[in-house]
Image (cartoon, rainbow, N blue to C red):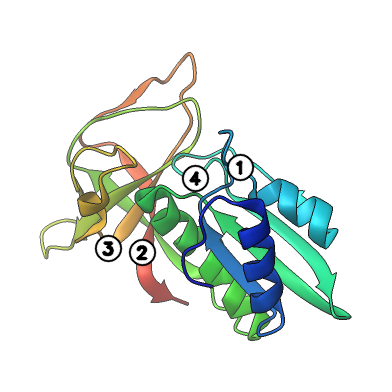
């Protein structure tokens, strides 16, 4: 589809064109809450799409949207990822890759491991997928999880060497931080079972 500016007519034309070529459309951007975030409205009003979810309770990636529609009598899958590069990277691993694998009849699932944190984390009100580098050693039972740095979703470089997404729980009144040495689950990137 290429880059489409936030113009309704241009987006409609590009979506129409791409839906004649493929059954799955994955986009990045234009699904948050701003004045120029018009993609969900276009999908609903011009393509009669059913929005299955338009927000997810996670960080990063809250605006992720999944919809289906029929175009030229064929079912189409529409996955709209956030425009922020880190959010798009995380949601690509959590939503887009599993969708594509299932459509190709590949039912493998990501490998989830327990890992020991090597730094502390302030918990967010939403579950968070923090980028990390897991390292295995012959002396530790669990792999050690090293943060890739500041987990701000605009810092794409913190994804560069990440080989896992730490699955951090949502903050509660009883638990507001995780400490170095705490054990959490992590999803390995690039590995399936």
Q: Which residue is mark 3?
A: 163
Point out the tag, 2 or 1, that comes first from the N-terminus: 1
Q: Is residue 49 visible?
A: no
Q: Dot 3: few (<14), some (14–19), or many (≥20) neighbours within 10 Å?
A: many
Q: Quadrant of residue 12?
A: bottom right
2 vs 1, front mark? 1
Q: Which residue is mark 1?
A: 56
Percent of width and height locating residue 123 = 38, 27
Q: Which residue is mark 2?
A: 188
Is the residue 91 above or below the residue 152 in the image?
below
Point out the tag, 4 or 3, that comes first from the N-terminus: 4
Q: Which residue is mark 4?
A: 61
26 or 7, nearer to the observer: 7
Point out the tag, 1 or 4, that comes first from the N-terminus: 1
Point out the tag, 2 or 3, that comes first from the N-terminus: 3
Q: Dot 4: few (<14), some (14–19), or many (≥20) neighbours within 10 Å?
A: many
Which residue appears at 71% of the width and 69% of the height?
77
Which residue appears at 46% of the width and 63% of the height?
93
Task: Confirm or deny contact between disc 1 and disc 4 (CB under 8 A).
Answer: yes
């Amino acid at each position: 589809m290429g880059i489409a500016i936030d113009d309704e007519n241009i987006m409609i034309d590009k979506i129409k064109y791409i839906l004649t070529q493929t059954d799955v459309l994955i986009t990045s951007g234009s699904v948050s809450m701003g004045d120029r975030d018009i993609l969900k409205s276009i999908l609903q009003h011009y393509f009669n799409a059913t929005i299955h979810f338009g927000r997810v309770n996670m960080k990063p990636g809250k605006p992720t949207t999944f919809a289906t529609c029929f175009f030229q009598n064929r079912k189409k899958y529409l996955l709209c990822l956030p425009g922020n590069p880190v959010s798009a990277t995380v949601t690509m691993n959590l939503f887009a890759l599993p969708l594509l694998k299932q459509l190709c009849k590949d039912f493998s699932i990501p490998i989830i491991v327990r890992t020991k944190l090597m730094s502390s984390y302030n918990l967010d009100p939403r579950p968070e997928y923090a980028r990390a580098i897991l390292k295995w050693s012959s002396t530790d039972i669990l792999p050690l999880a090293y943060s890739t740095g500041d987990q701000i979703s605009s810092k794409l470089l913190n994804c560069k060497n990440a080989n896992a997404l730490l699955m951090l729980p949502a903050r509660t009144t009883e638990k507001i931080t995780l400490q170095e040495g705490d054990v959490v689950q992590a999803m390995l990137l690039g590995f399936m079972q």
